[in-house]
Image: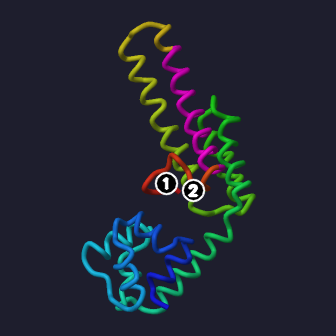
Amino acid sequence: MSKLKAVREQKNLTQEELSEKSKISVRTIQRIESGTEPKGHTLRALAQALEIQESSLQDKAPITATNDLKTELEEEQTDINFSYIKIINLSSLLFIIVPPFNILVPLILMFKMKQRNSLAKQIISVQILWTIIAPIVFMLGIFLKLGRQFTLVLIILIILSNVFIILRNAAGLDRNRKLHYKLNFSMI
């Protein structure tokens, strides 16, 4: 089995879905899966669509790397309990007024529920970023000296923005098992 086919099947994608996601024709994907080695733009587009390193799709990569990738993908798929992920996500709502706890509680739940996967890490990373940005926006509002009413409205908007992020991610998890708001990197 080709490396592309193995990774594609681990990600539960059809050739057509991979084609749509990577903007590479189905015929090209079929050729690669039957033995042609991807190069250049095709290699980059497929690796980006599958969220893996380019070297994982090349024949020059050691076989153990493919096996490691396969094992890692299998663990990732089997370890995800979407009910727990939703609980971890929604737990931030309980402590939205006390920003350090909107990170700490989901982090504790992540370890307690044994959900150390990319979805849980992304949820916590988004909360960390919000916790960093919220006081900065609040301080900028104070420095502008637009009055107490503006400061109150600003606080409410900051809190509502986090409520919206959490609820939108919860809806995304319910609909298509993906987060709507996520970062391209993990803070944990």
Residue at the far front in the pictured view: 27
Above or below for 15 versus 122: below
Query: Which is closer to the viewer, label 1 or label 2?
Result: 2
Q: Is residue 27 magenta?
A: no
Q: In the rendered structure, which segment of residues is drawn in magenta?
A: 152-174
Type of the residue with mark 1: Met
Say which label, 1 or 2, has the lower sequence index: 2
Rendering quarter of residue 31: bottom left
In magenta segment, residue 162: yes
**Do tag 1 and tag 2 residues touch (Cβ < 8 Å)?**
yes
Q: Nearer the viewer, residue 115 or 35?
A: 35
For badge 2, the amino acid type reads Lys
Percent position of residue 74, x then y: 61, 76
SS under mark 2:
helix
Q: Report the disc number at residue 121.
A: 2
Residue 38, given in percent of the width and then of the height, sits at 31, 82
Q: How many numbered discs sit on the rendered protein?
A: 2
* Residue 187 numbered tag: 1
Residue at (73% x, 54% y) in the render = 83
Q: Main secondary structure of the magenta part?
A: helix
Q: Residue at x 71, y 52 (%)?
A: 109
Q: Residue at x 34, y 72 (%)?
A: 25
Report how far apart the C-alphas of labels 1 and 2 lie in the structure: 8 Å
Q: Horizontal and vertical percent for residue 32?
A: 37, 85
Residue 24 at x, y percent in the picture: 34, 70
Q: Is residue 51 visible?
A: yes
Q: Residues within 10 Å of mark 2 (few under 14, many from 20)?
A: many
